[in-house]
Image: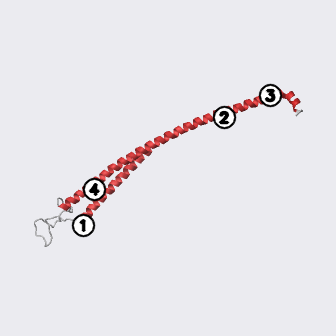
């Protein structure tokens, strides 16, 4: 330690300058760190705001899409209910005798109304379906209406998705 005192007495000014420069350097380093942290915090806040806006936009789009799907579903459910009601009404009318379900045919060239008919053939009345065939016809008609409604609902949803993706 006694050898250090003459060294310090001789070089105290350069050592003081060195310590002062080191202090200024570390103070600048610390201030720069604060500025950098503040800039990072501002960037994080901006990114969080952008992320929140993107989430709000996605939520608005999702709600709009779900509302559109609900509208399509309601419209197609009404169409299906109307089609089923119509089929049931026709079925009831045929069962009650208010309507007849028959083949759409034209008489053959050799069949003349009023001509002598062969035994067992009735040329005056058009051919009708049996009760089982009528039931099958109405079941098929109801199934076709259901499938057409389902298909049109799917097409409406897909049309909406392709329009949404094009935006």
Crowd band around label 4 with a 10 angstrom C-alpha radius: few (<14), some (14–19), many (20+):
some
The residue at 27%/64% (across/down) is: 136
Give the percent coordinates (x, y) of residue 121. 15, 70
What is the C-alpha distance between the residues marked 3 and 1?
Answer: 114 Å
Residue ID for mark 3 = 16
Q: Is residue 156 above or below residue 144?
A: above
What is the C-alpha distance between the residues marked 3 and 2?
Answer: 25 Å
Q: Sequence order check: which comes first, mark 3 or mark 2?
A: 3
> Do we see residue 100 in this rendering?
no
Q: Is residue 96 left or right of residue 159?
A: left
What is the C-alpha distance between the residues marked 4 and 1?
Answer: 19 Å
Residue ID for mark 4 = 84
Q: Nearer the viewer, residue 45 or 79?
A: 45
Q: Under tag 3, what secondary structure?
A: helix
The residue at 54%/39% (across/down) is: 48
Give the percent coordinates (x, y) of residue 117. 12, 70
Q: Nearer the viewer, residue 118 or 102?
A: 102
Q: Under tag 4, what secondary structure?
A: helix
The residue at 30%/54% (across/down) is: 80
Q: Is residue 60 left or right of residue 102?
A: right
Crowd band around label 1 with a 10 angstrom C-alpha radius: few (<14), some (14–19), many (20+):
few
Location of residue 87 (image quadrant): bottom left
Placement of the C terminus among the 4 image quadrants: top left
Q: Is residue 22 left or right of residue 50?
A: right
**Outermost residue, top direction?**
13
Q: Which mark is residue 33?
A: 2
Select label 3 or label 1 by which is in front: 3
Q: Which mark is residue 132?
A: 1
């Amino acid at each position: 330690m006694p050898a250090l005192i003459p060294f310090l007495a001789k070089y105290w000014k350069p050592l003081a300058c060195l310590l002062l420069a080191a202090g200024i350097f570390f103070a600048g380093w610390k201030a720069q760190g604060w500025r950098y942290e503040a800039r990072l915090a501002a960037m994080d806040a901006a990114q969080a705001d952008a992320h929140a806006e993107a989430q709000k936009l996605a939520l608005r789009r999702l709600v709009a899409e779900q509302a559109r799907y609900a509208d399509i579903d309601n419209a197609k459910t009404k169409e299906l209910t109307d089609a089923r009601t119509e089929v049931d009404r026709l079925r009831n009318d045929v069962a009650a005798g208010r309507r007849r379900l028959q083949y759409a045919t034209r008489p053959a060239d050799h069949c003349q109304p009023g001509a002598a008919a062969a035994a067992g053939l009735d040329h005056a009345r058009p051919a009708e379906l049996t009760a089982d065939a009528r039931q099958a016809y109405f079941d098929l008609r109801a199934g076709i209406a259901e499938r057409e409604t389902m298909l049109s609902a799917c097409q409406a949803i897909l049309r909406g998705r392709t329009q949404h993706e094009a935006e």
